[in-house]
Image: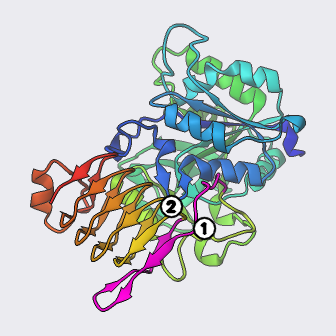
Amino acid sequence: MPTKRAFAMVLAGGEGKRLLPLTDDRAKPAVPFGGNFRLVDFALSNLVNAGIRRIAVLTQYKSHSLDRHLATTWRLSPLLGDYVAPVPAQMRRGPRWFAGSADAIYQNLNLIYDERPDVICVFGADHVYRMDPRQLIAQHLASGAGVTVAGIRTPIELAHTFGVIETAADGVTIKAFREKPDDPVGLLDAPSQVLASMGNYVFDTRALIDAVIADAANVDSTHDMGRDLIPMLVEAGKAEVWDFAKSDVPGATARERDYWRDVGTLDSYYEAHMDLISVDPLFNLYNAAWPILTLPEPLPPAKFVWEEEGRVGQALDAMVCAGVVVSGATVRRSILSPGVRVHSWAQVEGSVLMHGADVGRHAVVRNAIVDKNVQIAPGASVGVDSEHDRARGFTISEGGVVVIGKGERVDA
């Protein structure tokens, strides 16, 4: 099927409460990731790399940062009719916000009517992964299903955190879709695993239109894709699953073939960053055959200065972006975003520093996420004494990661 007849709707309206304080004033899909990127860049890159270039990004909460990123970064060719367009809650169906992900589509049915696509990709906006949507679409068209859900094999003990897909004997037809079950059923060929929904779907256009209209009329519905819409299509016998284990992306190694991370908590967000910096990374940002796209800032190369006894500017097992200056300091197992400054005798270990963060002389930062434009004063410490950090009002994750909110100052 020509991809020009596919239309994508990216669901980017989530609040991301579990990522506070990173989502204090930005939507979850706009949260920076991996130095240069925003979370939304991963879904958009997968779609655009596959040739799906008519994309509506449905936004809602704290959307200014996200809208600005889409406007400045994701300009496709209007000559060819390609676009990535942010679509806020326009209240076309009455004076109300989106009541859920299914309602977000219902309130924007005019976009579907205008585009008249054969299939519609409905993707989440806040996961880290590579996928070629054409493979998902190919199975969907061959089967004639109303919806095909992308599923990933996950340990059964994690089933309570996902929407879980139970298949019929053929391994493809979905016989049940259960949201965060307490009594999951393992796969026939792998009893210790379940198929978890990745939050990515391909719909037959008519099936999606009919389903969201029926859902909108159901007063008992929560108007959610996973809780309501997909189970409706499962009950009608119109739902199938595509196993992400079959994914084949150009340039991807076997090690990262089925990599997908839901970075919905501070710990999962931190761990996904740590996945990037090993010698043989679990997720390889350097795959030029299927790049993760974003707009690079006009910054000079990173710089490392001073080489004298006890004062060497160096970064080890780290990713360092443009515009960074490491001046007589040591950085280990960390990611430094554009414009970060780390001054003499400072130590940064196991941390994620976002744009413009400044670490003063003799300061120590360990196991921390430091948001944009944070000022860490000379001699200050973060992540060294958890009780001291907690007493200063800093957020500490369940895994012990200290998080400093945007623009804060950390005094000694």
Q: Which element is circle 1 on?
A: loop
Q: Are marks 2 and 1 in contact (CB under 8 Å)?
A: yes
Q: Earlier in the sequence, mark 2 or mark 1?
A: 2
Q: Percent from the top left, x then y, of residue 65?
A: 50, 37
Q: Residue at x 89, y 38 (%)?
A: 80
Q: Residue at x 13, y 66 (%)?
A: 385
Q: Which residue is mark 1?
A: 285
Amino acid type shown at disc 1: Leu
Q: Residue at x 41, y 49 (%)?
A: 264
Whether residue 178 sits left or right of residue 404 in the image: it is right
Amino acid type shown at disc 2: Gly
Compared to 100, does 241 lie above or below? below
Whether residue 258 sits left or right of residue 219 in the image: it is right
Residue 226 in view: no
Q: Which residue is mark 2?
A: 34
Q: Percent from the top left, x then y, of residue 213?
A: 64, 18
Over which residues does the magenta segment extend? Answer: 293-321
- Seen from the viewer's position, the closer of residues 113 and 379 is 379
- Seen from the viewer's position, the closer of residues 171 and 276 is 276
